[in-house]
Image (tube, rainbow, N blue to C red):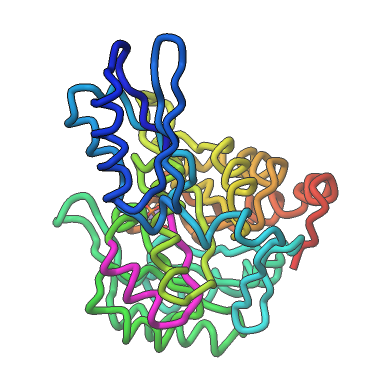
Amino acid sequence: MIVILKPKTSKKQVEEVAREVQKLGYTPHPIFGELQTVIAAIGDERTHHTLESLTVFPQVERVLPVQKRYKTVSRESKSEDTVVDVDGIKIGGGNFVIMAGPCSVESEEQLISTARAVKARGAKILRGGAYKPRTSPYEFQGLGREGLRILAAAKQETGLKIITEVLSERDVEHVCEFADVLQVGARNAQNFQLLIECAKSRKPVLLKRGMSERIEEWLLAAEYILSQGNPNVLLCERGIRTFETYTRNTLDLAAVAIAKKESHLPVIVDPSQGCGRADLVPILCRGAVAVGADGLLIEVHPFPAEALSDGQQQIDFNVFSQLISELEPFLNTTKRKLL
Ligand code: PEP
Ligand code: MN
């Protein structure tokens, strides 16, 4: 870290701060400038106490961190792409995956017809929420255990792997009996106890970005999972909340490109929550592939108008089919192979 001292700081005051830097485990190297002095504090910032509290000294102007706060998720710690193996489906490192299915599991007929349709068009993983995080307690909350049973039936029937959301620590164990990938939703993106429980399960985890989460915070949330010994994390950009009203969220494709640079983890894009509009989903899928995403998580419903959640953003089988057929040139451009 760099400790910047105020102009006209006396030598004695410099020494006072340097002693404190030393006490906190860093080696201080004062650099005396013409007008101002800075102290370079040498030491690993990720394992030592932060020096930001030194601003309580009246002679300290600012403290600047030098290192990134995340360690194991960073490209610096591992330069090659991580490939997350979902029971034989290897995501990342050039392999592109389509995950698709309804927002919520509503009935056996709805889920199985969707599973068949998305499988026929190349999806490898079936999505569907059994536990739904809804803004209002009066809205459909998901079928719970019955939803998980239906997901298992769809898997049995089609062989598709299953991704479903886990809402609380309490549910991790039994959701794991049905899920091949645990989805941690935007509303739980920084529920650290839940992240730790998911990590301990050793299942692959798809970690959504929180609606007002900075990229650094998103990567630090992933760090919670990796630091618990579970390297199988899929980052998922799903739009952030901005002042815009034409879309439900603002899909941040720059964040995808940044996450790919900063981290070795695969990055998935969810265009459905990302814009909240079925008409934009195909266009955003192409954008996601073009910026280097490793997969898509798309909401597909047999009759979006009748959906019990997120009807406005779900696409039907025909639109899904058309969308997939249009992706190829974009996959070629970014050297992605459709799984
Ligand atoms: C969903 O995938 O249906 C969902 C609730 O996602 P998010 O957590 O991104 O809002
Ligand atoms: Mn949804």
Q: Position of residue 196 (x, y in %)?
A: 33, 72
Q: Nearer the viewer, residue 151 or 16?
A: 16
Q: Nearer the viewer, residue 116 or 229?
A: 229
The image quadrant that residue 165 belongs to is bottom left
Q: Position of residue 248 (x, y in %)?
A: 39, 36
Rendered view: 266 above or below 176: above
In this image, 11 relative to 267: left or right? left
Q: Nearer the viewer, residue 146 or 39?
A: 39
In this image, 59 relative to 84: left or right? left
Q: Is residue 44 magenta?
A: no
Image quadrant holding the C terminus, namely: bottom right
> What range of the chain is rendered magenta?
192-209
**Residue at 46%, 16% in the rendered image:** 33
**Residue at 64%, 46% in the rendered image:** 261
Outermost residue on the front side: it is 12
Outermost residue on the left side: it is 137
How many numbered circles does the render carry? 0
**Residue at 73%, 63% in the rendered image:** 93
In this image, 175 relative to 160: left or right? left
Quadrant hosting ligand 2: bottom left
Q: Position of residue 319 (x, y in %)?
A: 63, 50
Q: Position of residue 1 (x, y in %)?
A: 42, 39
Rendered view: 134 above or below 112: above
Rendered view: 244 above or below 51: above
